[in-house]
Image: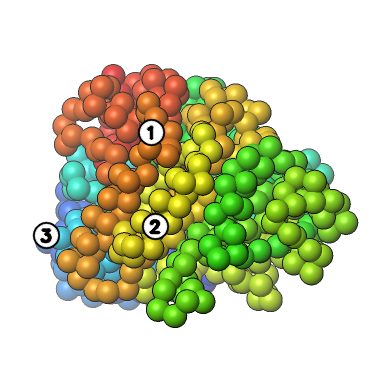
Amino acid sequence: MASHVFLVGFLAITCSIAMASDESPLQDICAADSIAMASDESPLQDFCVADLNRSVFVQADDLFFKELNLTSNTSNAVGSLATRVFVTEFHALNTLGIAMAGIYTPQNSSYEYVLRSLIQMERFLPLPAIPKPLFIVTPFLESHIQAAIKCSKEHGMQIRIRSGGHDYEGLSYISYQAPFIIVDLVNLKSITIDVESSTAWVQAGATIGQLYHAIAKKSLTLGFPAGVCPTVGVGGHFSTGGYGMMSRNYGLAADNIIDARLIDVNGRILDRKSMGEDLFWAIRGGGGASFGVITSWRLKLLHVPETVTVFTVNRTLEQNATKLVHQWQYVSGKIDGKLLLRLFLRRINSSHEGKETVKASFVTLYLGGIDTLLPLMQESFPELGLVRSDCIEMSWIDSILYFAGLRGEPLDILSTNTPWLTGTYFKGKSDYVTEPISETGLESIWKRFLKYPDEITDMQFSPYGGRMGEISKSATPFSRRAGTLYSIHYGVKWKEEGISAMNRRMRGIRRFYSFMTPYVSKNPRSSYLSYRDLDLGVNNKGYTSYEQASIWGLKYYGINFKRLVHVKTMVDPDNFLRNEQSIPPL
Ligand SMILES: Cc1cc2nc3c(=O)[nH]c(=O)nc-3n(C[C@H](O)[C@H](O)[C@H](O)COP(=O)(O)OP(=O)(O)OC[C@H]3O[C@@H](n4cnc5c(N)ncnc54)[C@H](O)[C@@H]3O)c2cc1C
């Protein structure tokens, strides 16, 4: 039975005969391309051949060549074993009437397109030294993933799992450690909303924008608390946390997941019941890629009022920004959970010619109307001087467009997958703050920010408290709960080409991070997994000890790191699913 499943599954992924459906963004993939790719040097040559039952191939050959109108010369080019795999798959899947996975090797003209289409961190695009995958599999079915896992395992290839491709260090499409393939979930993006039970199933390749859009099409009073940028994939986002503008009222995306489907290292398809509570706990904030391929999530949808209010109030240093930011630290985590006052800090030209200043933007979502917001702000944060004309009432789904900088665009834009940071290189890091930074401290930070523009471009302060602080530190692997005032995100963006420009920015942001040490969390200094940062430490190429991994493991997961290691030891003792910052087994 096991070998049958393996064969069917494997064959599914090894076939790339123009299987992109009409809706697929990969429409230009043609059969000829797919076949030409399997040259003699192709890794497909001996890929899992041991399990192939040769007798079926003979039967399938005729049908295959007839359907594709191929000559016998073409078949030679394909390479005998690969051909047989293709042929059998074609036969088997046509008999069953189901879709086939795409598979792209470097010989395929679509390989570069497929690889690049979801590289959201452009700093990894131009570098020839960055290792590339042997091939990319784009499954349509869970069985294609089962096959990819089993075959990769057997042949010593690592797997990179990609949903939206936003990983800050490119770990969904780069491996520095071994020959690897990418399992790209771009074709697994169906979303089913059940308004009656306020639940949804969303496949891992969907983006949060597509999810928000699908919810709004069914109901204007249901929503989901996840991130701001619509192109972020639910596969990586939900498994690493997922903070957004409703998190003070509802927690993280990961806090609102009620079931999941995952394919484990043995190729088994598991749901919450069959995977057990330990593994289900681990994938909601512990990073999915250490534990399996998540194919879909079941979500608890949350109530949103018909009318929400947004505002963005900007204040520069000359307009008292330091005092306001100082005060914000005392207010933003304690105020009503329905109100999330996020703070963005940027450099802008000041009114004094030739000088720059810091602009603090208080960007806010309130789950209610202006009439209740104004007295709340007057009572809690009168210093900001919020007035009615600053506020805009709208639906929750329109607030998604507003915060994404897409106000006025049609809702359909949430379903597009256009890379977010096109033409810009980027590196990010993160911190947590547990004690308010003094006014003097803030002034030192502004001074440094203004003096060294190459170090960072902007900072975001995201308030915690509310529901974030009520959830227990061990409820999910995400441990920054009560006691955390806010998180800081540092970003540096640049457009200049070349390694030296990049290295300058990388060194710069590290210096800024070091400068921030006295102001942020300690023992350990914590970071947010969603903003992955390899500067915190990486696994060895071979064995990595618990102690070594603790260096970054404790920063991301705090008290939960140990349990994550235990779960990993239980579900993947041989450490097949590993990357530069995966959880090691004991
Ligand atoms: C422009 C931008 C905006 C962002 N905004 C926010 C925000 O508002 N709030 C916030 O909290 N975070 C935000 N993030 C961070 C984001 O949540 C993380 O980068 C997240 O991991 C991205 O998920 P992805 O699927 O797009 O990325 P991917 O690169 O595809 O995946 C990220 C990681 O998850 C793994 N993974 C992906 N899919 C699966 C799967 N199906 N099964 C198992 N493992 C999987 C990958 O292997 C990789 O290790 C933002 C990032 C960017 C670049």
The residue at 31%/26% (across/down) is 550
Q: Which of the two marks, 2 or 3, is nearer to us in this view?
A: 2
How crowded pointer 2 is (Cα within 10 Å; few <14, some 14-19, many 20+) is rated as: few
- Residue 461, disc: none
Does residue 215 show up?
no
- Looking at this rendering, what residue extends furthest in the left direction? 41
Q: Earlier in the sequence, mark 1 or mark 2?
A: 2
What amino acid is labelled 2 in the image?
A: Lys
Front residue of this view, candidates 14 and 485: 485
| Local SS, label 3 | loop
What amino acid is labelled 3 in the image?
A: Glu
Q: Which of the two marks, 3 or 1, is nearer to us in this view?
A: 1
Query: Which residue carries the number 2 mark?
Result: 447
**Seen in the image, is 393 located left or right of residue 149?**
right
- Residue 525, disc: 1
Query: Which residue carries the number 3 mark?
Result: 41
